[in-house]
Image (tube, rainbow, N blue to C red):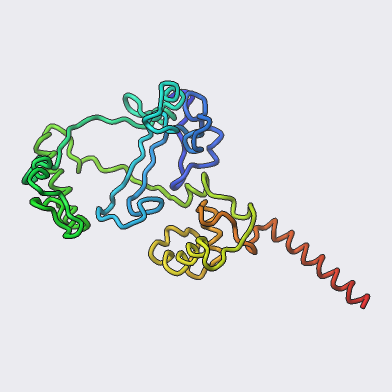
Amino acid sequence: AAGNPEPSFCEGAFDSTKEAEIMAANGKSYGGLPYEYGRYGFNVGCNKLGEYPFPMYEVYYPNSTWYTLPGSCPSKTFDVSDAACASAEPGGLCKGEPTGAGDCTWNYEFMGRVGIDEFVETPVDALHKSGGREYDPFTDKGIRTSFWDGINNTAANSKRVTALRKLFATKFSNQTLDEEMPSPPCDFNFGEFYKEFWWNAPFEGECKDAVQGDDCYKMAKWGKTEGIYSHPEYYPGLTAASSLKEFQQLLYMQGKAACPNRPCGIAGKEESKEEDGEKKADSEEEKEEKKKQ
């Protein structure tokens, strides 16, 4: 839209060199909102399930993705939002093809709906009345129904998704098939994103080393001995050879509540210069003291 240039993106985060050219919507920014909305408007986000920041457990649906479609008044919960808030924070939903302006980033079209009740043996209400249940976590099976048997089985989940797709195609044969509309690629790079918007500056703030027994030490230790192997993507820039202090520093940068302080002894360029200067001064004082002796 005129006067609303589209955001330019680098891999997984906003291109800071374009920042001065971008306004949120209608030539204004949204004060009081998180930086990525307040500065760039109500952009669509995504997160691959099973990867940081959530969920932090294994997901048995390959390539599954959550998409963030920001609605109006995101600064408040749905039960306390009001017209004034919706006007000040319109969200990204708009009519027609999205323009890329801060208040026009997505829309949707209702294409139909299918439910599990339509092809399971017994509808849920009737199942419950008969003493059945959709799923029992102790047996990994349903009671008087089999739809959710093997709920954490990737192959079984694939069959369930395929069954739902086939049902939709039969019921709404005039609609475009799900397979013909590939999902938008999710190139979310959490390291770049959180580093730009949320991380603490690595060499600023009070330093205090994590000590054995406290929560920060446990978190850093786990990251160095286990996390770096099972989820290396959680620790950008680190390896198993990185020191415990480097893991603490990263956790501090990520704003982890367990690590409110940066470690001591890991200095930035300016601090290194200051420390070198202090060491030289101490050395000169020692020389003078020895001469006196």
Percent position (x, y) of residue 144?
8, 51
Q: Which residue is nearer to you in this view: 96 or 166?
A: 166
Q: Is residue 266 left or right of 65 when viewed as pictured?
A: right
Q: Please tell me in which quadrant of the rendered image residue 98 appears.
A: top left
Q: Residue at point 33% right, 28% down?
A: 97
Q: Is residue 83 left or right of 246 when viewed as pictured?
A: left
Q: Is residue 283 left or right of 72 when viewed as pictured?
A: right
Q: Residue at point 37% right, 30% down?
A: 79
Q: Residue at point 31% right, 47% down?
A: 65
- For residue 204, above or below residue 67: below
Percent position (x, y) of residue 20?
56, 34
Percent position (x, y) of residue 292?
93, 75
Q: Quadrant of the C terminus?
A: bottom right
Residue furthest bottom as drawn: 293
Percent position (x, y) of residue 3?
49, 24
Q: Please tell me in which quadrant of the rendered image residue 83 appears.
A: top left
- For residue 283, above or below residue 131: below
Residue 284, visible in the rendered structure: yes
Q: Which residue is nearer to you in this view: 64 or 125?
A: 125
